[in-house]
Image (cartoon, rainbow, N blue to C red):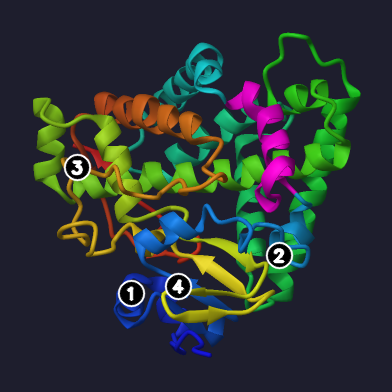
Amino acid sequence: MTAPPRFDIDPIAFHADPYPALKEMRATAAIVDVPQLNALLMTRRDDIFTCEKNIDVFSSVQPGGLMTVLMGENMMRKDGEDHQRERKQAFPALSPRTVRDVWQARFEDDTRAILDGLAEAETFDVVRDFALPVCGNALRHMTGLTQLSAEQIDATSQAMIDGVGNYQGDKQIEARCHEATALLDAAIDERLASTLQSDDQSMVAVLSRAGQVVESIRANVKLAISGGQNEPRDAIAGAVWALLTHSDQLAQLRSGTANWSQVFDEYARWISPIGMSPRRIAKDFSWQGLDLQTDQRIFLMFSSANRDERVFDAADLFDVTRDTSKAVSFGAGPHFCAGAAASRTLIAQVALPMLFERFPGLKLAGDVAFAGWAFRGPLTVPAADS
């Protein structure tokens, strides 16, 4: 029996910048055992692309997993028919057609108002003052929790993201997550108790009409908020930083030799806002000569797959003209992100083009630091219009 080799990390350094360690992991073996995370890590793109589809072994069902314990059993923690049924029930709220016909106009109106509010500011933080409210307002509409503010959406999302990534067992992080989920449960219950119009395309209304039980509605709306706030927020702010630090790439956009969809796709590959997805080994299995045991925890490292030098040339460089068709930024199997159409529209068709159109002289006004490995993004992006 050959177990995956041990690979030790410095958790603080890994949180600050996981990419050097991930590169070493890819060179070491197909799967490594990282005791500091109490998990196996799969880091190579082709392995993840294949294994994520094998739900009989790499199962999303994790009864004792942090997401299930803290947020409820949502569709991402179900496999097979159970997953597909709830995904299909949510589809009317998230489909490309609904995004185009219902949500995009609201995205544009909210973004325009946010930009109007920034017009007189000497400097602003792209994360806090732009990306946060853009994404928070989008989720208010899409979930149906319009009684909450964009700031509340962001705070609860961050608390849940911190909670489900709390592999060190920090009690304060866990407590903040519980407070956030209690607030969201109360808001969901309030909306369910109100009169939901037949043409309401929000998740709460769509899932209620589909007959989904209250516990599942709560869990799936919380899933949408945890995944639909932080990742688009971080992608918007991070892509702004990337363009402002790569003037040649910005010039290609302005000349028409590149477009905003390419920016979105390449940034999501280069600094993956969703760095990993956890799975449970459902039965003993061997992969690439390494033996996996039932109930082991394994992380599919999307961020590492997207920089796999076996697949992408000069993978550590940001290049908006790159072919990103092999990237797995949204996953590669049946759990492919259900909100991908909404994210692409919000970021590539609304937030980024509207920001750069309103502020043609946009420039950085301070240092930018990134953090995170399970979820990664800039902490602040100070900017000004010259």
The residue pinned by badge 4 equals 15
> Mark 4 near mark 2, Cβ–Cβ under 8 Å?
no
The residue pinned by badge 3 equals 320
Q: Which residues are magenta?
A: 74-94
| SS under mark 3 | loop
Q: Nearer the viewer, residue 169 or 369?
A: 169
Q: Earlier in the sequence, mark 2 or mark 1?
A: 1
| SS under mark 4 | helix
Comparing labels 4 and 1, the label whose residue is closer to the camera: 1
Badge 3: residue crowd in 10 Å (few <14, some 14–19, many ≥20): many
Is most of the magenta stretch helix, strand or loop? Answer: helix
The residue pinned by badge 1 equals 26
Badge 1: residue crowd in 10 Å (few <14, some 14–19, many ≥20): many
Q: Nearer the viewer, residue 313 or 318?
A: 313
> Residue 21 in magenta?
no
Total number of numbered labels? 4
- Residue 38 pos. (x, y %): 60, 81
> Mark 4 near mark 1, Cβ–Cβ under 8 Å?
no
